[in-house]
Amino acid sequence: MTEPNKLYILWTNDNVMTSEKMVLMYAQNSMLNYWWKEVTVIIWGATAKLVAENEMIREKIKLAIHSGVKFSACKACAEQLGVTDKLLELGIEVMYWGEGLTEILKENEKLLTI
């Protein structure tokens, strides 16, 4: 039996300190230290607005992407908050996540929610 080696981080908290000191730090270090083979951060809700508007968070995301972390944002949230273009400019995938999140949960994938 192989160990699950893929982590999803559902990032809904728009607190800057939590974003910097937990979500982005853990995601990037997970890749740099080979704790997980694949890390995908799902940007959902208010976090989409934080990412679009906070330059420090944007720079941290760029570093994480460079380290191999994947980022994907909820399209409905991005559209409702008017930030789709800014997320796409960062190289963040924007898609509807309701069905995808449901599949992650039904398949008992590794999911960390912040």
Image (cartoon, rainbow, N blue to C red):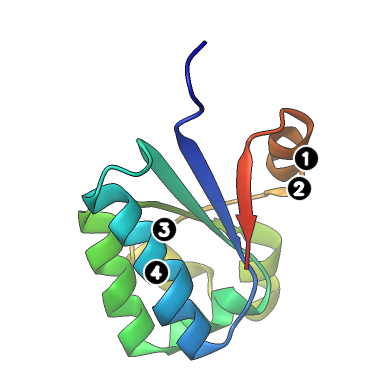
From this view, report whether residue 16 is shown above or below residue 20.
Answer: below
* Residue matched to label 2: 98
Q: Check whether the beta carbons of the residues at disc 2 and disc 1 lie within 8 A of each other.
A: yes
Residue 92 circle label: 3
Q: Mark 3 falls on what kind of element?
A: loop
Q: Is residue 100 above or below residue 66?
A: above
* Residue found farthest to the top: 1
Asked if one can make out residue 91 in the rendered structure from this viewpoint, the answer is no
Residue type indicated by callout 1: Thr
Q: Quadrant of residue 27?
A: bottom left
Compared to residue 76, the image places residue 103 above or below, namely above
CA gap between label 2 and label 1 equals 6 Å
Left or right? Give the position of 18 relative to 76: left
Answer with left or right where residue 112 lies relative to residue 68. Answer: right
Q: Position of residue 43 (x, y in %)?
A: 56, 64
Query: In this view of the protein, can residue 1 be seen by the observer?
Result: yes
Element carrying mark 1: helix
In the rendered image, which residue does mark 4 sit on? 24
Distance, label 3 to label 1, CA atoms, is 21 Å
Q: Please, is residue 104 above or below residue 82 in the view?
A: above
Are there few (<14), some (14-19), or many (20+) residues within 10 Å of tag 1?
A: few
Q: CA distance from mark 4 to mark 2?
A: 23 Å
Quarter of the image where the C terminus is located: bottom right
Residue at the location (22% across, 52% down)? 32
Task: Please state which of residues 13 and 51 is positioned toward the viewer in this rendering.
Answer: 13
Which quadrant holds residue 80? bottom right
Q: Residues within 10 Å of mark 4 (few under 14, many from 20)?
A: many
In the foreground, 33 or 42? 33
Residue beneath label 1, please?
A: 102
Report the front residue among 19 and 97: 19
**Circle nearer the viewer, 3 or 4:** 4
